[in-house]
Amino acid sequence: MSVSLPEQAKTWIDEHEFATIATIQPDGQPQLSVVWVSYDGDDLLVSTVKGRRKHLNLERDPRVTVLVYPRGMPYTYVEVRGSATMTEEGGRELIDRLNDAYTGTGRYTADDGTDNVRVVVRITPDKVVLRA
């Protein structure tokens, strides 16, 4: 059963605050990455590349936690725990949209000339903790 993403969390995401995503390594240890994030309704959206650690971890175990907090107020945050689904559809469009939102430079060019396949990670919240 999914839960709602609080409006405060959406505000922070709209302000392009960075997020940290936690996935589970094969040995059970957490793996953390700083990511750009957006949302679609109550789901969070993150981009990754097929075959990278996040992608491999989520293929094996879809449980995930995302933490978003404002740069100037690190003791306020939203923690979103849930499960991830992934698709290649829309992967290029998502990274371009995130790149433009976070850097203002339009198209994400770091993948140009590579064989990287972009993946949309959709995180459906099961539990949300807001400290505002």
Image: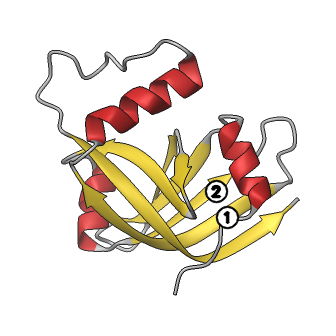
Residue visible at 38% across and 67% down? 84
1 left or right of 118 in image: right
Query: x, y (%) of residue 124?
Result: 48, 70
* Above/below status of 120 relative to 22: above
Residue visible at 79% across and 66% down? 130
What residue type is disc 1 on?
Glu
Identity of the residue furthest to the left in this view: 115
* Above/below status of 30 relative to 127: above
Which residue is disc 1 drawn over?
79
Label 1 Cα neighbours within 10 Å, binned few <14 / some 14-19 / many ≥20? many
31 left or right of 42 in image: left
What residue type is disc 2 on?
Leu
- Which residue occupies the foreground of this view, 42 or 67? 42
Residue visible at 71% across and 35% down? 15
Q: Earlier in the sequence, mark 2 or mark 1?
A: 2
Which residue is disc 2 drawn over?
67
Query: x, y (%) of residue 23?
Result: 42, 63
45 left or right of 11 in image: left
- Which residue occupies the foreground of this view, 11 or 56? 11
Label 2 Cα neighbours within 10 Å, binned few <14 / some 14-19 / many ≥20? many
Residue visible at 21% across and 48% down? 88
Identity of the residue furthest to the front in this view: 41
- Which residue occupies the foreground of this view, 104 or 54? 104
Quadrant in the picture for residue 67: bottom right
- Which residue occupies the foreground of this view, 111 or 11? 11
> Which element type, helix, strand or loop, lies under badge 1?
strand
Quadrant in the picture for residue 13: top right
Q: Are marks 2 and 1 in contact (CB under 8 Å)?
A: yes
